[in-house]
Amino acid sequence: MTTARSGTRAPRWAIAYKLHAVEKITRLLEVEWNVGRTGIIATRAVLEPVEIDGATIT
């Protein structure tokens, strides 16, 4: 017979360590508008590239 546990399905030994977020300031260069085939309008921000921890983010 198994016993039902209340709570999450994740195992107790699985621990997630979360690091503090690195924040940078960049400029908004352009906003692109895209209309999908279902008619939904999706916006996309084009940002000035910025380097965070050795990776270039655009």
Image (cartoon, rainbow, N blue to C red):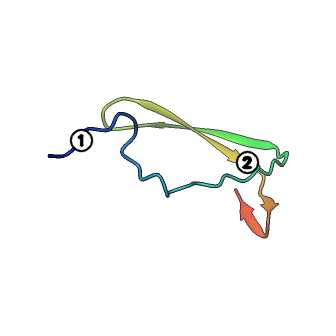
Quarter of image, res 51: bottom right
Location of residue 39 by image quarter:
top left
Q: Using a 10 Å C-alpha cutoff, classify the residue at mark 1 as few (fewer than 14 neighbours), some (14 to 19) or many (20 or more).
A: few
Q: Which circle's residue, 1 or 2, is located before the other in the chain?
A: 1
- Mark 2 is surrounded, within 10 Å at the Cα level, by few (under 14), some (14 to 19) or many (20 or more) other residues, namely some
**Residue furthest front as drawn:** 1
Q: Are marks 1 and 2 in contact (CB under 8 Å)?
A: no
Q: Position of residue 57 (x, y in %)?
A: 71, 59
According to the image, label 2 marks what residue?
47
Q: Is residue 24 found left or right of 36 in the rendered image?
A: right
At 76% across and 44% down in the image, what residue appears? 29
Instruction: Give amino acid for label 1.
Output: Thr
Vertical placement of 27 versus 52: above or below? above
The nearer-to-camera label among 1 and 2 is 1
Residue 45 x, y percent position in the rendering:
65, 41
Seen in the image, is 45 located left or right of residue 51? left
Q: Which amino acid type corresponds to the residue marked 2 in the rendered image?
A: Leu
Residue that badge 1 annotates: 3
Name the residue at the left extreme.
Answer: 1
| Disc 1 to disc 2, C-alpha distance | 53 Å
Q: Between 5 and 40, which is closer to the camera in this rendering?
A: 5
Relative to 19, say whether 8 is above or below. Answer: above
Residue 9 location (% of width, % of height)? 36, 45
The quarter of the rendered structure image containing the C terminus is bottom right
